[in-house]
Image (spheres, rainbow, N blue to C red):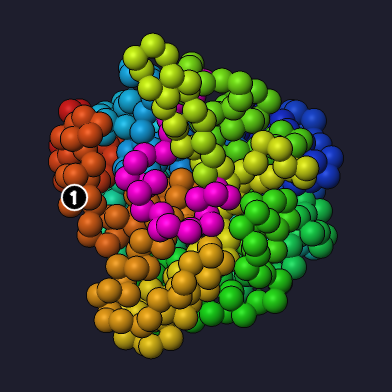
């Protein structure tokens, strides 16, 4: 796994200055080549800069980047039944036709680079001889980030090596840990973050801020609820979701306010590089949505995908999310070709007055987590949580019904509430054991043939060569 940890040069020498980012550090900036490795964690200023660098790389590379070519909501939306490709032969087709190969699995290397930085920071902060006023904050953020990155690794690749140190000799010989062990580590890290982080949101100086860019205790709690749900620990998933829902810092808002900057429904968001509008699909046009940005038309070089008919047909009549969160573009009739209507994600508005940020955790998901956890325990009040989300969408509440019908309704609600966000659909299909059945229907329309092995992406061949203890995911050419 040598490639995974090549990022060590960055941290050990700080030969590349970490860019300042007003959203995180309010202008804090460090010059390059001025800090010895032994001094990196001797002050809050330099420690914060290292941690902030992780957030900056999240914006600029890997599964959380603003670029449409890599954002996880886009690639996994294409991979499943949320999006359809509009340009044949484009990079989007690789994901859309489930044709990803071993050399195209960049998320693996990117996430492990980030993990190496976080692991090194945890070790450096814990052994620092400096007087770090905000040590708990920096450590809490690092434990949270480590859990967050492993959450994506285990859901994309299945069993993965659990690298918890920055020791190359150890990490280069790690075998893949079972998914259950990975979730145990995710939960342990989130509980550690929960114990270290404050109730308030902090900025890069460790000071209280209204921006929700860095994790606080509630962020760790919300992510812990999700982790427990995925680990099928229904009791703890319910408890952690309840703690988040009961927090008066958060509330369910009207649909047109959910994705605005500093929305009270936002639990955690990534700050973006664009000063105004930013979208999870931002690629060209100054950060404007790349799925389609007027006056471009579907099928042009910048408009790669639209919402699929499978997703559009999931919305019930009268669902206000369709009018608020879905945009349309009509290509006029030409000759014998009739007019065509295309549908696109519209959660982030190109005409928004305030800046918009990529939302990673929000309150409505917590209601759906608790609804599912309660339903799995056969609790009557599970439907109440489901109906909070439905009523906000202008739909009628549902009766309790049987456990099976309620779980079906919850899964359907997750599909229409969380569409194209953070890979939720792909992960939901996998954890509920429905991905093969769903994709057997979807794949022929792409057209492609779905195989069960496609539920786990390939591990890069270079890492397999470097580490004899690392086994590949089946089905892919090495």
Image location of residue 70, percent across then percent down = 47, 32
Quarter location, residue 92: top left
Residue displayed at 26% across by 45% down: 456
Q: Identify which residue is drawn at 65% across, 41% down.
A: 349
**139 is higher (above) or lower (below) than 4:** below
In reply to whether residue 314 is colored magenta, the answer given is yes
The kind of secondary structure element at disc 1 is helix
Q: Hey, which residue is sitting farthest bottom in the picture?
A: 380
Residue 262 in the image: x percent, y percent?
A: 73, 56
| Depth check, front residue: 272 or 181 | 272
Residue 353 coordinates in the image, percent (x, y): 78, 42
Residue drawn where x is 43% and y is 86% of the image: 381
* Label 1 neighbour load within 10 Å: few <14, some 14-19, many 20+: some
Q: Which residue does the numbered mark 1 point to in the structure image?
A: 436
Q: Is residue 373 above or below residue 307?
A: below
Q: Position of residue 143 (x, y in %)?
A: 55, 60
Quarter of the rendering containing residue 168:
top left
**207 to the left or right of 285:** right
**Quadrant in which the N terminus appears:** top left
Given residues 7 and 130, the one toward you in this image is 7
Tell me if residue 72 comes above or below residue 241 in the rendering: above
Please give the name of the residue rendered at 60% of the width and 38% of the height, measured from the top-left corner: 279
Residue numbers of the magenta segment: 302-325
């Amino acid at each position: 796994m040598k490639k995974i940890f090549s990022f060590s040069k960055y941290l050990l020498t700080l030969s590349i200055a970490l860019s300042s980012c007003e959203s995180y550090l309010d202008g804090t900036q460090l010059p390059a080549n001025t800090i010895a490795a032994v001094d990196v964690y001797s002050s809050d200023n330099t420690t914060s800069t290292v941690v902030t660098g992780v957030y900056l790389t999240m914006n600029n590379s890997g599964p959380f980047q603003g670029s449409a070519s890599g954002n996880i909501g886009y690639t996994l939306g294409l991979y499943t039944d949320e999006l359809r490709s509009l340009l044949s032969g484009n990079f989007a087709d690789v994901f859309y036709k489930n044709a990803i190969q071993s050399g195209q699995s960049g998320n693996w290397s990117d996430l492990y680079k980030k993990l190496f930085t976080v692991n090194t920071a945890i070790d450096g902060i814990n052994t620092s001889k400096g007087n770090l006023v905000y040590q708990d904050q920096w450590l809490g953020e690092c434990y949270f980030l480590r859990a967050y990155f492993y959450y994506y690794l285990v859901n994309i690749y299945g069993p993965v090596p659990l690298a918890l140190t920055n020791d190359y000799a150890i990490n280069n010989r790690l075998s893949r840990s079972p998914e259950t062990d990975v979730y145990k580590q995710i939960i342990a890290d989130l509980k550690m973050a929960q114990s270290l982080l404050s109730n308030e949101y902090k900025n890069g100086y460790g000071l209280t801020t209204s921006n929700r860019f860095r994790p606080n205790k509630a962020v760790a709690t919300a992510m812990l609820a999700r982790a427990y749900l995925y680990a099928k620990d229904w009791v703890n998933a319910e408890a952690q979701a309840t703690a988040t829902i009961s927090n008066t810092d958060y509330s369910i808002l009207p649909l047109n306010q959910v994705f605005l900057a500093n929305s009270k429904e936002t639990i955690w968001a990534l700050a973006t590089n664009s000063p105004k509008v930013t979208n999870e699909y931002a690629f060209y046009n100054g950060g404007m949505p790349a799925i389609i940005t007027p006056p471009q038309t579907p099928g042009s070089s910048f408009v790669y995908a639209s919402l699929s008919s499978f997703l559009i047909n999931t919305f019930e009549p009268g669902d206000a999310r369709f009018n608020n969160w879905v945009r349309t573009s009509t290509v006029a009739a030409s000759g014998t070709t009739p007019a065509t209507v295309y549908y696109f994600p519209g959660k982030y508005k190109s005409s928004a007055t305030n800046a918009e940020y990529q939302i990673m955790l929000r309150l409505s998901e917590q209601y759906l987590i608790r609804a599912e956890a309660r339903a799995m325990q056969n609790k009557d009040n599970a439907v109440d949580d489901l109906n909070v989300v439905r009523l906000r969408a202008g739909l009628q509440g549902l009766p309790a019904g049987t456990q099976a019908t309620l779980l079906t309704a919850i899964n359907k609600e997750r599909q229409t509430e969380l569409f194209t966000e953070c890979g939720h659909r792909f992960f939901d299909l996998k954890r509920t054991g429905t991905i093969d059945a769903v994709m057997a229907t979807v794949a022929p329309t792409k057209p492609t043939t779905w195989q069960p092995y496609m539920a786990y992406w390939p591990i890069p061949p270079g890492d397999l060569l470097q580490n004899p203890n690392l086994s590949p995911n089946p089905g892919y050419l090495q």
